[in-house]
Each structure stands twice: as structure tokens, then as C-alpha cells.
Amino acid sequence: MAFDTPAIEDEDPTADTARACIVYSLVPYLGIVFVPIALAVSGFGYVRSRQNSRPEPKRFVFCAGLSLVVLAVQVFLWWLLYYIPKIGV
């Protein structure tokens, strides 16, 4: 028996891609690879939704803001990876 999810007509695949990149960017250390992708896809989706005058830009702004927060955490984790061996803890 297969479980089918109903297709949502209003969803933009660009928003799904941005959200997926944000989820992948939550992986410690490796996730920093996905942060620029999430920012680029969010920016592209924002511009495209503004051009099509769709009421969706809030999703892309939220995705971009969240990816900037994740970027700050990832940079902090990379700094810790460098700093802890340096101080000899």
C-alpha cells in the first residue's frame, strides 16, 4: 500500500529547495556548504516572486534570514574547531 501525499498547487518548488537547503545546512560543520546555496535560492525565489506579483516573498525572506542565523552558528562552530586545539583544552 502506497501513501500518497496530496499535491499542493500553490507551492513553489523554489521555496521547497530553499527549505531543503536550510535543513541540510543544520548538519554541524558540513552544513556550511548548503548555506550559500540556501541564500542564492532564496534570493532567486524572492526576485522571481516579486516579478510575478505573487504573495509569497515572505517565505523567501524567512528562509534567507534563517540561513543567515545558521551561517553564524556554523562559523562559530568552525571557529571553535580551530580555537580549542590552539589553547590546548
Image: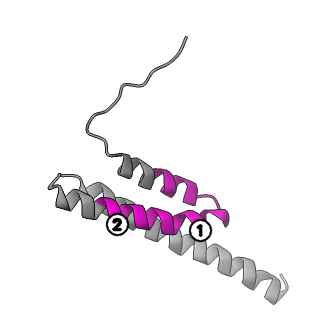
Q: Is residue 2 above or below residue 39?
A: above
Q: Is residue 55 above or below residue 8?
A: below
Tell me: 79 left or right of 88: left
Residue furthest bottom as drawn? 87
Q: Position of residue 50 (x, y in %)?
A: 19, 61
Indicate the quadrant where residue 6 lies.
top left
- Three-letter code, disc 1: Ile
In this picture, which residue range is highlighted in magenta?
A: 19-45
Q: Which image quarter holds the C terminus?
A: bottom right
Tell me: 31 left or right of 84: left
Q: Residue at x 32, y 59 (%)?
A: 45
Q: Which image quarter holds the N terminus?
A: top right
- Residue named by callout 2: 43
- Three-letter code, disc 2: Gly
How far apart are the alpha carbons under marks 2 and 1? 17 Å
Q: Is residue 82 magenta?
A: no
Q: Is residue 66 visible?
A: no
Tag 1: Cα neighbours inside 10 Å, few (<14), some, or many (≥20)?
many
Tag 2: Cα neighbours inside 10 Å, few (<14), some, or many (≥20)?
some
Q: Secondary structure at mark 2?
A: helix
Q: Position of residue 60 (x, y in %)?
A: 32, 59
Instruction: Say which mark, if any, is on residue 88.
Output: none
- Residue named by callout 1: 32
Q: Is residue 68 above or below residue 6?
A: below
Q: Is residue 28 magenta?
A: yes
Q: Is residue 42 visible?
A: yes
Q: Residue at x 42, y 25 (%)?
A: 5
Tell me: 47 left or right of 69: left
Q: Residue at x 17, y 52 (%)?
A: 54
Q: Secondary structure at mark 1?
A: helix
Which is nearer the N-term, disc 2 or disc 1? 1
Q: Position of residue 18 (x, y in %)?
A: 43, 55
